[in-house]
């Protein structure tokens, strides 16, 4: 048992070290990854646009980001956005264009010639998170004025170009690499990580299907793995409207799974809250296909407020458990929930506001918060699983010890039953063989010898009755034994003074079959000693119960000084052994005249239930 507890302490100690290492890693990750890209100069904030890929009409000017209006989506799926660039000499040695945010896809033309064509325009490849850094070929540049056309392919609700950056290739390269890594490479890594975490949760649940927290953790991981495909998967394997439906359903299911996981992780049940959350997600799943593409982006944002509320609720539940119950795991999850919520607010602001500072320095970051959340949850799950296994190992050790004790008790019981069976066999032999001969002596010998034979025959029958008796009550045993002793003493002309003070509860105390047998044998041995050796005329038996059985047997015979057998012969040694076998004590008392013994024996605390 001690080894198991030591093992449990060692395991949790190592796990604390691992958890501490993980949290340090997370802090270093957040501190080493810049939240905002370095500001760039040369933003092209003024331009002209026409709808279509080969415009022939009049150009319309705009300032800031170019965005499709909701009414534009009904008639147009393409637009050409034109920016005026300075002459070749003013552009420097390695001029380049950094197109860092656009939707859905864009091809670049310099003075009418294609210089970048990543993916298809019809249907558009999804490059809304994929930046483009394109060097401006010197052979296409003009000395006076140059025109950059961004041919934009859109889907309803997603059509814009944030101001491109004009600068030198070597200066823009680090910013391009940072954005590509932050939005594409990291998303690919998150996809692989969430798939692995989802499989881990699924396997843990299959190992123990009663622990549904593993199932919901795996479901949350799989849902976010689908969402993490959004930044880097360009050409879809399903229609765009189906993809949008799947993508936003996964966001809602992720929040629902986190809520259900939080309840089961902390061991709390709030079925009404769970039913409301499930109802919201089901309502969203039903209504998403019914919403027009033009307003889908706005409608999905409103629906995601419900998902946001679920995560806020989870954070509040973590605060409650951390403050009221002092659970450290609650504080750990609270930090992760809080970070993810803040990143979600940041992305919502980035989507809805046209701030120049945000154009220059920021990008969508909620996708970066999820792996931190899921990794923290997985660490907590592994810690809980390891602690649970240690406690199971401890419980198994205790069960094994109880089983061994049970086996030992069973063996002792079998030994007692075997001994009882052997006594029964001996009694039958005595009754059949010796008893028959004693009965012949009763009828064939003189009266004096016949009395001895009667006594011996009575003793054999008494042994048989005691050996076959079952458990009884103290009151029944006292009455039966009193009648037997009185009968024997009457045959020898002796008097019995029986004083048994037993209240109703004491009378119903259980006396096991073994105690019944051994105490009966002790009383017969004491009566036999008084009859044969003590030359007594009276025997006093005093029976009391005060938490244990007190029995004092006294005679008025010659006393211990004149009876070597009473002073320590085989009879008294046998009595002492019988009482010790019952867990009691046996004491010889030497009064001025006669002989006395005192017996103490433990009794059960509760009376025997006869029902």
Image (cartoon, rainbow, N blue to C red):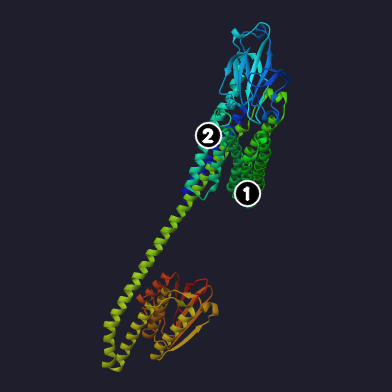
The label on residue 274 is 1
Camera sees residue 555: no
- Residue at the extreme front of the image, as rendered: 56
The percent coordinates of residue 564 (x first, y second) are 36, 78
- Residue at the extreme bottom of the image, as rendered: 447
Callout 1 secondary element: helix
Q: Residues within 10 Å of mark 2 (few under 14, many from 20)?
A: some
Q: Nearer the viewer, residue 371 or 500?
A: 371
Please name which of the two marks, 1 or 2, marks the residue nearer to the observer.
1
User: Pointers 1 and 2 in contact (CB under 8 A)?
Assistant: no
**Image quarter of residue 468:** bottom left
Q: Residues within 10 Å of mark 1 (few under 14, many from 20)?
A: some
Q: Nearer the viewer, residue 3 or 92?
A: 92
Q: Does residue 201 appear to the left or right of 36 in the view shown?
A: left
**Image quarter of residue 160:** top right
Placement of 502 over or under 287, stated as above or below: below
Residue shown at the point (39%, 75%) measured from the top left? 575
Instruction: Report the Cα–Cα distance between label 1 and label 2.
Output: 28 Å
Residue shown at the point (35%, 67%) measured from the top left? 415
Placement of 512 over or under 94, stated as above or below: below
Placement of 304 over or under 452, stated as above or below: above
Q: Nearer the viewer, residue 356 or 65?
A: 65
The percent coordinates of residue 83 (x first, y second) are 68, 16
Callout 2 secondary element: helix
The percent coordinates of residue 98 (x first, y second) are 63, 18
The percent coordinates of residue 456 (x first, y second) are 32, 85
Which residue is the site of mark 2? 193
Camera sees residue 300: yes
**Image quarter of residue 47:** top right
Q: Nearer the viewer, residue 376 or 139?
A: 139
Whichever of callouts 1 and 2 sits on the residue coming sooner in the sequence is 2
């Amino acid at each position: 048992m001690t080894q198991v507890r030591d093992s449990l302490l060692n395991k949790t100690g190592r796990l604390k070290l691992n958890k501490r290492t993980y949290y340090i890693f997370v802090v270093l990750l957040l501190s080493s990854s810049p939240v905002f890209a370095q500001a760039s100069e040369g933003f092209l904030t003024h331009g002209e646009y026409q709808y279509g890929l080969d415009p022939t009409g009049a150009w319309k000017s705009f300032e800031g980001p170019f965005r499709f209006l909701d009414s534009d989506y009904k008639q147009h799926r393409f637009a050409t956005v034109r920016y005026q660039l300075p002459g070749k000499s003013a552009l420097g040695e390695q001029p380049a264009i950094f197109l860092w945010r656009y939707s859905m896809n864009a091809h670049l033309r310099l003075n009418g010639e294609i210089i970048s064509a990543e993916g298809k325009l019809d249907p558009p490849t999804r490059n809304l998170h994929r930046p483009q850094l394109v060097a401006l070929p010197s052979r296409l540049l003009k000395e006076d004025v140059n025109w950059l056309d961004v041919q934009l392919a859109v889907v309803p609700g997603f059509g814009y170009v944030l101001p491109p950056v004009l600068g030198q290739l070597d200066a823009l390269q680090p910013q391009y690499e940072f954005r590509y890594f932050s939005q594409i490479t990291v998303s690919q890594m998150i996809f692989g990580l969430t798939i692995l975490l989802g499989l881990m949760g699924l396997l843990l649940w299959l190992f123990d299907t009663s622990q549904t927290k593993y199932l919901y953790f795996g479901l949350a991981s799989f849902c976010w793995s689908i969402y993490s495909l959004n930044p880097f998967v360009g050409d879809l394997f399903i229609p765009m409207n189906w993809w949008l439906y799947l993508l936003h359903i996964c966001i809602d299911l992720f929040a629902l799974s986190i809520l259900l996981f939080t309840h089961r992780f902390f061991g709390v049940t709030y079925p009404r809250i769970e039913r409301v959350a499930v109802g919201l997600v089901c309502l969203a799943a039903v209504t998403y296909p019914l919403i027009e593409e033009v307003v889908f982006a706005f409608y999905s944002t409103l629906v995601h407020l419900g998902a946001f509320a679920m995560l806020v609720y989870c954070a509040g539940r973590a605060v409650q458990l951390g403050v009221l119950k002092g659970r450290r795991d609650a504080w750990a999850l609270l930090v992760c929930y809080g970070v993810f919520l803040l990143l979600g607010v940041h992305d919502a602001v980035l989507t809805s506001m046209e701030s120049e500072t945000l154009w220059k320095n920021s990008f969508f970051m909620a996708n970066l918060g999820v792996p931190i959340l899921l990794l923290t949850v997985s660490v907590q799950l592994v810690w809980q699983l390891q602690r649970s296994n240690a406690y199971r190992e401890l419980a198994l050790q205790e069960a094994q010890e109880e089983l061994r004790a049970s086996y030992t008790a069973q063996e002792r019981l079998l030994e007692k039953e075997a001994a009882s069976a052997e006594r029964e066999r001996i009694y039958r032999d005595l009754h059949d063989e010796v008893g028959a001969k004693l009965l012949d002596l009763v009828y064939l010998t003189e009266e004096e010898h016949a009395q001895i034979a009667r006594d011996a025959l009575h003793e054999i029958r008494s042994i048989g009755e005691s050996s076959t008796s079952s458990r009884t009550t103290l009151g029944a045993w006292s009455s039966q034994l009193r009648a037997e002793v009185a009968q024997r003493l009457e045959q020898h002309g002796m008097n019995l003074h029986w004083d048994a003070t037993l209240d109703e509860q004491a009378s119903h105390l259980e006396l096991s079959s073994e105690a019944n047998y051994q105490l009966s044998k002790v009383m017969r041995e004491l009566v036999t000693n008084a009859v044969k050796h003590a030359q007594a005329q009276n025997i006093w038996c005093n029976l009391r119960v005060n938490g244990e059985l007190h029995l004092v047997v006294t005679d008025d015979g010659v006393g211990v000084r004149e009876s070597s057998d009473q002073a320590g012969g085989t009879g008294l040694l046998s009595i002492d052994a019988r009482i010790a076998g019952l867990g009691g004590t046996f004491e010889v008392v030497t009064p001025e005249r006669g002989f006395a013994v005192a017996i103490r024996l433990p009794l059960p605390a509760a009376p025997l239930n006869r029902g």
